[in-house]
Image (cartoon, rainbow, N blue to C red):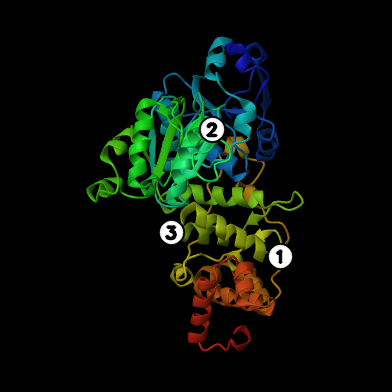
Amino acid sequence: MIASSVNALHAVWLDPFSPLGEAERAQLDAAGVTLECVSTLGEMNVALRRAHVLVVRLGDSADLLLEVQTLIAQLGHVVPVLCRVERRRMEVVVEAMRLGALHVLPTDEWEPQAWREALQGLNAPELKNKSYVFVDPVSQHLLALAQRVAQAEVTALLVGPTGAGKEVLARVLHEASPRAKGPFVAMNCAALPEHLIEDMLFGHEKGAFTGALKEHKGLFEQAHGGTVFLDEIGEMPIHLQAKLLRVLQEKKLNRLGGETSITLDVRVVAATNKDLRQAIQQREFREDLYFRISTFRLRIQPLAERPGDIVPLVLQSLARHAKEGVPYTLSAEARDMLLQYSWPGNVRELENVVQRAVVLCNGRTITPVHLMFDEASAMNSVPELAPQTPQPLSQPVLQPLPPQAAYEALPSTPMATPEMQAYAAEAVEEPTALAVNLQHAVKSSEQQIIMAALQSTESREEAARKLGISPRTLRYKLAQLRNRGMSLSFAE
């Protein structure tokens, strides 16, 4: 049974210290693992497209694991990593597991049974379909903890700011659990009118109320054998909290208008951006329900506190917007600007910024002139940027290609306005002047983009849609431009 779980697994093999011998390869073949050895970045990029697992040998530290994980995310792949470490390097073993390695094996371990156990439960098709980013050490620690929690049949409470990725973590809990093959059903408790939430959760019988022409299964029944995700649970009406508590305690429910109890087999994951303890003191949330749903609490940090995730998230989003198979790239200046921004809207705001950049970019390289942030004062608060050089992979592994290979820019067409063309030319000719004059350049480019949108549309509402911002935000920006003495009569 164990052998079948790893049958036909394809592994990319990365060992910068010693080649793989024929005897060792035969042992891995017996474990059901086929190998593809790589030594350059280009080879790895191609190989990862068809890989189920990446096997990396570590030396005196786990730095190579972190570099490889970052590269995997930058290239748009999602592949688990198994590490090989010398037996005497126990500190490296501990660090590799902390960074989220799938498993760690000794470098002299070749027994097929050991490899089968290390790869037990690895379902290649499901893993390849994941699109999660956990690159920053803070995120990798959270991922490792979530994977452990997923194996236990306990309720989990996800705490963090709006837009930080609580539903993503909830899906990780589901997909890493024994319930992965069951349904994942989510509901935002703040998005529905109070009188509909009970029906959505628990369902109703035919004739239970006017308009109930047939029976309806609620989310708990729909999630039988899987996971129910209750987002913004702090917004649930107090009278429904009592019924939810009873369902969680008894593992049974009664539909509206029904008399028969229905046995449930579900796991509940809840999320909130509120301080539930304060809500308890204000009698807005039941204390007994709080302790029932928070068997294990997982806190998601704001995006600004896990900067290692920012660029991989941007590149992942850009990959989703690729046209005709040609991906967008990110200039070094734009990357620095993204890393310096405070991201008050977290991952949700990042997605908005990327979508606007794609709309505004005529070529395939995203530069600072294409970045428009949600905060009305963001353009006035971006600090001067110091150039940052991405950390290269270890030289023995990736010598043939430069460390910026993942960011190589394709030729792009400059924006149509002469001011933007002049700015782009100046940025290329004088890279050091970019950081010094960035604040002024960003203001100027924002003004030009807004003017172009207003001139090419029939109304300010249409212009706001084109820019990817709300009409209210556009009105605020127009007021700022008027305060600078600019005439906007055509936009009225």
Residue 138: x and y in percent read 41, 42
Q: Nearer the viewer, residue 450 or 81?
A: 450
Position of 18 with respect to 303 (left or right) is: right
Answer whether residue 63 is visible to the viewer in this image: no
Q: CA distance from mark 2 to mark 3?
A: 35 Å
Q: CA distance from mark 1 to mark 2?
A: 45 Å
Which numbered disc covers residue 362? 1
Q: Nearer the viewer, residue 324 or 393?
A: 324
Q: Nearer the viewer, mark 2 or mark 3?
A: 2
Mark 1 nearby-residue class (10 Å; few <14, some 14–19, many ≥20): some
Q: Quadrant of the N terminus?
A: top right
Return the x and y of residue 243 as percentages of the image width and height: 36, 37
Closer to the eye: label 3 or 1: 3
Q: Is residue 310 left or right of residue 280?
A: right
The residue labelled by disc 2 is 222
Q: How many numbered marks have been drawn onto this rendered protein structure?
A: 3
- Residue 344 bears which disc, if any? 3
